[in-house]
Image (tube, rainbow, N blue to C red):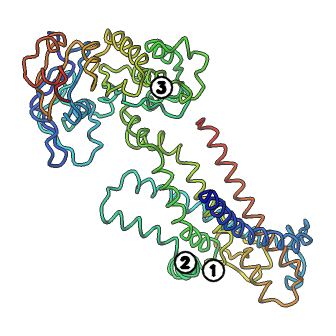
Amino acid sequence: MSKPAIETRYLNLFYDTFHALEDISISIEERKITALIGPSGCGKSTLVRVFNRMNDLIEGVHITGQVLVEGEDIYAPNIDLIELRRKVGMVFQRPNPFPLSIRKNITFGLEIHNTTRKTDYSGIIEESLRSVLLWDDLKDKLDRSALELSLEQQQRLCIARVIAMKPKIILMDEPCSALDPIATSRIEELMQELQKEYTIVIVTHNMQQAARVSDYTAFLYLGKLIEYGETKRLFSAPREKQTEDYITGRFG
Amino acid sequence: MKAQTEQRIAVSILFLCTFLVVVPVLVILIIISMKGVSALTVSFLFDMPQNGMTSGGIFPAILGTVYLVVGAIVFAVPLGVLSAIYLVEYAKDTPLSRLIKLAIVNLAGVPSVVYGLFGLGIFVIFFGFGASILSGSLTLGIMILPVIITASREALESVPKTFRIVSLSLGASKWQTIRHSVLPHAIPGILTGTILGLGRAAGETAPILFTVAAFYLPKLPQSVFDQTMALPYHLYVISTQVPGIPEHTRYGTALVLLLLVLLLNLGAIILRYQFRKKKKW
């Protein structure tokens, strides 16, 4: 096994008194797709939001245990949150481009991090749009509003917006749940493509999707990590009774 | 059939109410325009008053009102917008912050004469600014603060939460998020609040009565520590305090005040339109 991109050790997370994640120890491999599955409320979205510390926005959250991203404890007091979120990008459930031009959407993060006044971003714009296969469609429309795009294109743009920051890890929180089946399969193809360069963690309520796209799958239930392993093995020969019940559709 | 009759009655009543609201506004505009338009000449607008204000122009009052409104805006908009940003983006939801928000909303309902007395006590006497443009602007500014804060808060709160979340997830700091992803989308709403405040600041008499307004001044104010004439007070003076003012002068003054407020509003509306257009959504 190569060195893990993300590693948690006895991670516990509480919303005030509610114990949302219990003793999670998981090691996520570099340049692989890891799927987090489980029924609603199992903590899979909470877990993925631990990795870029988006849970910090919610009042009353506190955490025990360790979370390492590329070997660095991201809950250490001296951690640079801005640098962390640049390294660990996030794609959300609903496509959420800013109501700005396509170009501005991609340069948003760059402009925020760049202290120099003027830079030519055209190279990075082309590169990011190429990597999400939007360049040929949009190269002449960069100044049009991002809201004119189809939902699928918007979601691709959101991925491009993350890629423009040159992250190491891309977190995807149910990235296809607002899309139709054809768009979903095209986004899945894109994920396979991106996996060559990025570590991807995807939260999904869709088991078929996890089985199709991921290399590793983690099954969470009621805040506990029930089973974690290679996707093929987990879906063909689950070791835990709860995993088997869930993937065969007996609950969830 | 019965539903349709009810529908017709409901629409008629709603329309009638709307009509009744519009009528007084139109009548005011028509009467003031008809009686005042004959007074509107270049010399009326740009000359000093003469012969105990019975002839000549109203230039010092126009200029004074412009000074006061600009002064109030310069003071109240930054203060109001920044405190609205604090209340919406940073203040935690505690009983204290709720009390502060409630107090600000209620401040909008305080009678303007109370603000006038407050300004007299604080700015004119305590800070020793005397009756001056500075005192008057600050008093008007404080009077319109609640309007600006409330409108700015609503504008900020109406910016979708996802803009903030996405911006933070891209590594922006909280301030960068506010500055780049929230504020630009809130500006039209903030300008609307400013427009409302502007009109109120231009038209109120009571707050300037004790803090700045002069009955008559032979020359224009030279600094912010000078008194000035102002349109609303001038209108009051020539309507009730000085005998022998021709009617068209009084209505002309009222018309100028109306037009001035309209002009200031128009400027803000154009500005708001420009911002909306830039947003492309």
Per the rendering, the mark at residue B115 is 2
> Residue B55 appears at what percent x and percent y?
90, 80
- What SS does tag 3 mark? helix
- What SS does tag 2 mark? helix
Q: Mark 2 lies on which chain?
A: B
Q: Measure how far apart labels 1 and 3 are at the Cα level.
A: 56 Å
Q: Nearer the viewer, mark 2 or mark 3?
A: 3
Residue type, label 1:
Ala
Residue type, label 3:
Leu
* Disc 1 with disc 2 on a shared chain: yes
Front residue of B121/A212: it is: A212
Residue contact between numbered discs 2 and 3, judged by CB atoms under 8 Å: no
Name which of mark 1 and mark 2 comes first in the sequence: 2
Q: Please tell me whether residue B15 is drawn above or below residue A115 in the rendered image.
A: below
Which residue is denoted by mark 3 in the rendering? Answer: A151
Per the rendering, the mark at residue A246 is none
> Which residue lies at the image location 56% right of the left edge and 53% below the top edge?
B190
| Residue B263 sits in quarter | bottom right
Q: Which chain carries label 1?
A: B
Which residue is denoted by mark 1 in the rendering? Answer: B206
Front residue of B153/B133: it is: B153
Label 3 neighbour load within 10 Å: few <14, some 14-19, many 20+: some
Q: Which chain carries label 3?
A: A
Q: Please tell me whether residue A148 is drawn above or below residue B87 in the rendered image.
A: above
Residue contact between numbered discs 1 and 2, judged by CB atoms under 8 Å: yes
Q: Please tell me whether residue B112 is drawn above or below residue B17 in the rendered image.
A: below
Q: Measure how far apart labels 2 and 3 are at the Cα level.
A: 53 Å
> Residue B91 appears at what percent x and percent y?
35, 56
